[in-house]
Image (tube, rainbow, N blue to C red):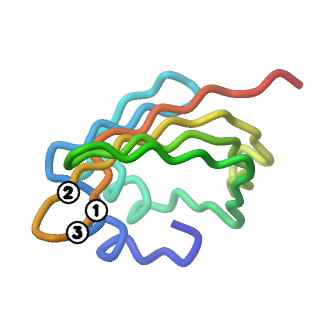
Amino acid sequence: MVAGDMAGWAARATEGLTYTHTTALFETRDEVVAAFEAGRRYTALSTEGVSEHVYDGAAVVTGIGHATIEVAGELDMRFTATLVRQDDDWRVAAWQSTRLPE
């Protein structure tokens, strides 16, 4: 997302991805890609306290994320990502983030 490689990002997501932002905005994979192609920009992303739990064909990843978004500024969030094993690779099937209090 920071590099703007949305084709690469989309290849790491399932076709049915559900992406819920800290604002509760819900987007599909194609809507996220279209928003970045239209100018949405993250200038920095980092994580901390990441925890991974792997199950048979699925994984749940949680942690704290720090993002700098060109229009909105800095954002701190708690996130949960659900990944599934697809075509011998891990792909994000769902993303949910919640803004941390100031």
Q: Residue at x 52, y 57 (%)?
A: 40
Q: CA distance from mark 1 to mark 3?
A: 4 Å
Element at label 1:
strand
Residue 15 lies left or right of residue 10; in this view the side is: left
The reply to whether the C-beta atoms of the residues labelled 1 and 3 are less than 8 Å apart is yes
- The residue located at (74%, 51%) in the rendering is 48
- Mark 2 packing: few (<14 Cα in 10 Å), some, or many (20+)? some
Q: Read off the residue under disc 3.
A: 89
Residue matched to label 1: 90
Report the residue marked by disc 2: 85
Task: Kindly identify the amino acid type of the residue bearing the numbered disc 3.
Answer: Asp
| Image spot of residue 86 (x, y percent) | 14, 60
Q: For residue 90, what is the image quadrant?
A: bottom left
Expressed as whole percent of the image width and height from the top left, the position of residue 10 reads: 28, 64
* Circle 3 residues within 10 Å: few <14, some 14–19, many ≥20: few
Estimate the spatial distance between the alpha carbons at disc 3 and disc 2, rounded to whole Å.
6 Å
**Residue 50 at what x, y percent from top left?**
64, 49
Residues at marks 1 and 2 touching, judged by CB atoms closer than 8 Å: yes
Residue 97: percent from left, percent from top? 55, 32
* 82 relative to 7, above or below: above
Secondary structure of the residue carrying tag 2 is strand
- Residue 78 placement, left or right of 40: right
Q: Report crowding for label 1: few under 14, some 14 to 19, many 20 or more residues within 10 A (C-alpha).
A: some
